[in-house]
Image (tube, helix red, strand yellow):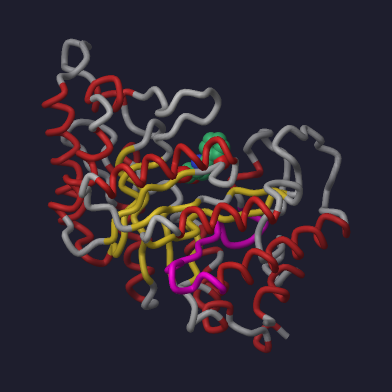
Amino acid sequence: MSCQVQSLWEAYKDFFPIGAAVNAETVKTHEELLIKHFNSLTAENEMKFSSLHPQDGVYEFKDADLIHDFAKRHNMKLRGHTFVWHNQTPEWVFKNEDGTSVSRDLLLERLKAHVHDVVKRYGNDVYCWDVVNEAVEDKTAQYLRDTKWLEIIGESYIQKAFEIVNQAAPEAMLFYNDYNECVPEKREKIYKLVRTLKENGVPIHGIGLQCHWNIFNPSFDEIQRSLEKYASLGLKIQITEMDISVFTFEDQRRDLTEPTAEMIEKQASLYAKAFKLFREYKDVINGVTLWGVADDKTWLDDFPVRGRKNWPLLFDVEHNPKEAFYRIVQF
Ligand code: HAH
């Protein structure tokens, strides 16, 4: 049966590459789906600072190498995720040996050394990088998120990061990546940040929209408005971490052992509308990545409710295509 299913990446070959987030396990357990349907990969955690560089002078490239090898072997693109982030960055980066906070210069030096070492290993096989992830404040009216990077370097840390990565990897496309990208207040801040960077001549080439959505939010109207607004920046757009949870963010329910028919239908309908919109923006969008491969393994099983099963992707727990899959390949 499954050999008659259309290939997702082939269906989209005239539009944009189709990516999946993977880890060292899923490149094995989900190999068949990956090869058939995807032509781009992102390491879910393995290229983050804490995974690659857990201690000063200690690199652990094993899992990232495995993902890199898999992408190369199967002719897939590879997105780099991520250099500067408030999460999954080890404490040593911000500390001197005596435990005091590092100087601005030393932190920039450390970032530069890290970026150079990582780029040296993967070179142009990583064709784009999420240089800065989630720098915009999410909960309050404040503009930038309070992070160690901001505290130690100041607002210029974002610009500096792009310059450092551009210097190490002049061929790579450099992205600013964020979530809640369709929430009006946050959208304004993300837009302002990226526009300011561009106006200041910072080497930024695109904006990464994570698109961690659910079947109730954001509304399709807000999604459309957001794409239009971001597209007006004149940079590339990538959908970098798409999934559609079957629960609202606040919903704590744990009673379901499988998604309801209504959830599956709502999800399929939103995926279909969104991909139609993405196709309309094919001149601006140059990549769409799902944050996982199939519903048997998704970060949403532990977020925001720990140990509560979710079904946010295009393939089910048995790796069969879901309604959403059929609706996005038939157009
Ligand atoms: C993303 N944060 C990160 O970019 C990615 O690296 C991680 O593996 C998963 C999700 C999204 C996020 C969110 O949707 C809500 C609150 C905090 C973070």
* Residue 232 placement, left or right of 158: right
Of residues 279 and 299, the one nearer the viewer is: 279
127 is within the stretch colored magenta: no
Q: Residue shown at 43%/64% (left/top)?
A: 41
Q: Residue shown at 77%/35% (left/top)?
A: 251
* Residue 215 placement, left or right of 126: right
Residue 9 placed where, x, y %? 52, 78
Magenta segment boundaries in residue numbering: 280-297
* Residue 48 placement, left or right of 100: right
- Is the N terminus in the top left, top right, bottom left or bottom right quadrant? bottom right
Residue 160 placed where, x, y %? 20, 39
Number of dots carrying numbers: 0
Q: Which quarter of the picture shows residue 316?
A: bottom right
Residue 25 placed where, x, y %? 49, 56
Of residues 152 and 207, the one nearer the viewer is: 207
Q: Residue shown at 16%/60% (left/top)?
A: 170
Tell me: residue 212, above or below residue 56.
below
- Is the C terminus in the top left, top right, bottom left or bottom right quadrant? bottom right
Name the dominant secondary structure of the magenta segment. loop
* Residue 129 placement, left or right of 116: right
286 is within the stretch colored magenta: yes
Q: Residue shown at 29%/20% (left/top)?
A: 151
Q: Which quarter of the picture shows residue 293?
A: bottom right
